[in-house]
């Protein structure tokens, strides 16, 4: 090749070494930025979200390159096995599924979803988190944490969501067929707030996939990384995660890689 191009071999190899050196320098720069973003997310972000953050900073880099550099750095998003409490064997009666896995929305306060998940503590045993999500923003607009998994748990979460959002129209509220969500007290609360109840089909978690996904993320990114001493410690940590991280700092792929709070703010600004 050198004879054909009529250039000295030393010039060719010097040029080749310079190219490799520039690539290495660039990779070193990216590695520092990747580590900074990874640590800022408390080791929660994987390659897609880190890639998005790098692009926002004006970098031109592919997702695959981010993945390769993360492998080199031996870092990855957190995946830790969850606690699995015993399932209920209570007989379940089917109810109307209005949502039917249509998670699309036009604005906020159109479709809300709710669910309960288990949080383990060393002193107080199992505690329970009821969450309410607005499907348009993926924001957790209300939640309740208790030592008891009774109807008051979900009613408090619903009240919190309603008082914060102050919706003006009718809302579809979708949940599973748990006894709390099918209780008379809960049904009366929905009527009071002008909400229409919708229920997942029996044994179909995909019918309520968005809130199921949130609870899975919560467990993976925070709950399963620590051991809670008691109810109070868990309650404080959940508040920090939901309000301090998930709603206001964690970017969400399904809403254009912005935060749930930013999505809500955009909607409210457009309605002014």
Image (cartoon, rainbow, N blue to C red):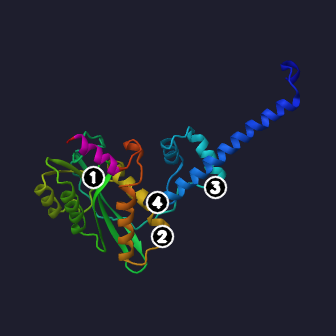
Q: Nearer the viewer, mark 1 or mark 3?
A: 3
- Which secondary structure, mark 1? strand
Query: Is residue 136 among what the camera can see?
Result: no
Where does the image place residue 175, in percent across and percent down from the top left? 27, 54
Give the vertical position of 201 relative to 80 (above or below). above
- Quote the CA–CA distance across marks 1 and 2: 27 Å
- Looking at the image, tell me whether mark 3 or mark 2 is earlier in sequence order: 3
The label shown at residue 226 is 2
Where does the image place residue 13, in percent across and percent down from the top left? 83, 33
Question: Which residue is disc 4 drawn over?
Answer: 221
Residue at (21, 58) in percent of width and height: 164
- Quote the CA–CA distance across marks 3 and 4: 18 Å
Mark 4 Cα shell of 10 Å, populated few (<14), some (14-19), many (≥20): many
| Mark 4 in CB contact with mark 2 (< 8 angstroms) | no
Q: Nearer the viewer, mark 1 or mark 4?
A: 4
Question: Which residue is disc 3 drawn over?
Answer: 74
**Towards the viewer: 198 or 73:** 73
- Looking at the image, tell me whether mark 1 or mark 3 is earlier in sequence order: 3
- The quarter of the picture where the N terminus appears is top right
């Amino acid at each position: 090749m050198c004879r054909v191009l009529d250039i000295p071999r030393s010039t060719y190899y010097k040029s080749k070494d310079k190219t490799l050196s520039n690539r290495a320098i660039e990779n070193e720069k990216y590695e520092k930025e990747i580590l900074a973003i990874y640590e800022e997310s408390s080791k929660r972000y994987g390659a897609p979200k880190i890639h998005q953050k790098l692009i926002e900073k004006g970098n031109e880099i592919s997702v695959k390159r981010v993945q390769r550099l993360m492998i080199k750095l031996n870092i990855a998003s957190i995946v830790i096995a969850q606690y699995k409490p015993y399932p209920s064997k209570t007989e379940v009666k089917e109810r109307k599924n209005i949502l039917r896995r249509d998670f699309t929305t036009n604005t906020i306060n159109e479709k809300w979803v709710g669910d309960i998940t288990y949080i383990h503590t060393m002193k107080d045993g199992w505690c329970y988190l009821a969450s309410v999500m607005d499907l348009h923003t993926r924001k957790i607009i209300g939640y309740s944490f208790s030592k008891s998994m009774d109807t008051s748990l979900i009613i408090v979460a619903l009240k919190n969501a309603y008082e914060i959002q102050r919706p003006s129209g009718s809302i579809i509220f979708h949940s599973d067929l748990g006894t709390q969500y099918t209780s008379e007290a809960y049904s009366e609360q929905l009527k009071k707030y002008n909400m229409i109840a919708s229920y997942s089909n029996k044994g179909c978690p995909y019918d309520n996939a968005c809130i199921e996904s949130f609870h899975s993320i919560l467990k993976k990114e925070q709950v399963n990384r620590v051991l809670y001493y008691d109810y109070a410690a868990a309650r404080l940590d959940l508040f920090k995660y939901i309000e301090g991280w998930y709603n206001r700092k964690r970017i969400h792929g399904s809403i254009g890689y912005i935060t749930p709070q930013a999505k809500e703010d955009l909607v409210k600004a457009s309605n002014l």
